[in-house]
Image (cartoon, rainbow, N blue to C red):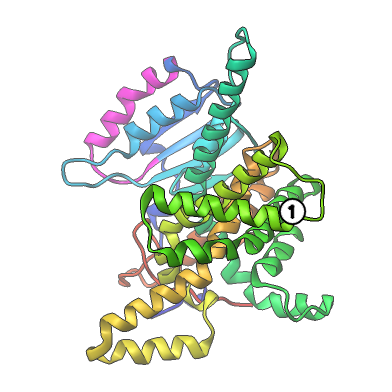
Amino acid sequence: MRSLLATTSQIVPTIDPNFRADTNRSICVFGELTDELVSKLAPEILHLRSLGDAPITIFINSNGGGVRCVEYLRDLLCSGTASGKRPRIITVAIGNAGSAAATLLALGDYAITYSKASIYFHGVRYSEAVEVTMESASSMAAQLESKNRATASMLAEAGTMRLAFHYARLKDDFSKIREALKKSDLSEIECFARCLKKHLSARAKTIVDKAITRWRSLQELSNVLAQPNASGKMGVEFEATVLHSVIDYEVEKNKNNKWTLDEKGIYQIASDYLLLRDYDLGRHVRLVETILARFSHAFFTQEELKKFAEASANESIGEAAKQLVINRGHQTIKPFCYFTSMIWRGLQEDENPLSSRDAYWLGAVDEVYDSGLPCLRDIAEAQDPQQPDLPDSDSTAPVKPTS
């Protein structure tokens, strides 16, 4: 099977509509994202969907608007038909893509931006001024935090696959980074973070710094799960055991400090608990097996891949071999998925104006027109069109890293 990242210069390119904007099957999100705009676009979307399941392109030039409007548009575009099919969505930023429009762009199955486009992410906001009391302020803050976490988790599902593409391409540079820093034990994730930062603007680098800091915190916290996992408890009883272990962890960690369970202490415990819950149950975990299928060569050693292949060839232990690969994949890929989800958590905090190249390297888009940056379209269109493993939205083709 040919690698998706293999050199394909000798193969005559083909045109793959899964990676191309199509003006004949498109809608335009221009101006503010409002209920009126959704009402205007709804008939166009329904008409395009009635013509078949071919990809639909969304051209975007908008400073944002209501997140609810993005949800309405996605429901119209992506809800399954009676047959369970939905069209592939290609999003294209031709000018500004800010706030909710940036979210719409990033949620595309294949996201493209023109080189001069501006991408702007920030957390969810209340759009209307309201009278605020102490009680309502607390409730509003909790609602905003919950919405930001949910949006970041949703965006991570798209962004993680894009960052896995970068990871596969950059993997060969990790040993060079360890040698340059004289840190042979530097983790793969920390090497990857350093690779990303080489390509980012100063502002965008802070997003990666936040993500790697949170990832390191998780490594310290991971031991907390040992006792709950061994308890055999389920549901809320398991969660209570995790919370109790988190309290023990913080008490032990801060026993020589003047640390108490005041507002700050309770907030730290809550943050630890939610961090662990996201790691074990976050939506990004769903992507582990997909990444395992597409990018196994980037996450496993050649020796491991050989053992997996030999085990899979033995029919008598086929299922056991499959489970072995999945379990090892979770050990290796899950930390990567968590790191990428933390990038999206950072993009949902503060104000984050990005260039088109920043958006590409942070996983917000797949392709930047006229930039020369590698993208899946070039690779997919260089494949033999008779191959069954083209990397469309349902592909599970493995990907080998190249230098």
The quadrant of the image that shows the C terminus is: bottom right
Q: Nearer the viewer, residue 164 or 206?
A: 206
Horizontal side of 26 relative to 348 (left or right) equals left
Residue at point 62% right, 38% down?
348
Position above or below: 41 against 22: above
Q: In the image, residue 37 lies at what x, y percent?
A: 44, 19
The residues colored magenta run: 36-56
Q: Nearer the viewer, residue 32 or 331?
A: 331
Q: Nearer the viewer, residue 206 or 53?
A: 206
Prevailing SS of the magenta stretch: helix
Residue at point 30% right, 23% down?
43
User: Badge 1 is on which residue?
Assistant: 209
Horizontal side of 102 relative to 355 (left or right) equals left
Q: In the image, residue 157 lies at what x, y percent?
A: 47, 51
Tag 1 secondary structure: helix
Is residue 263 highlighted in magenta?
Answer: no
Which image quadrant for residue 166? bottom right
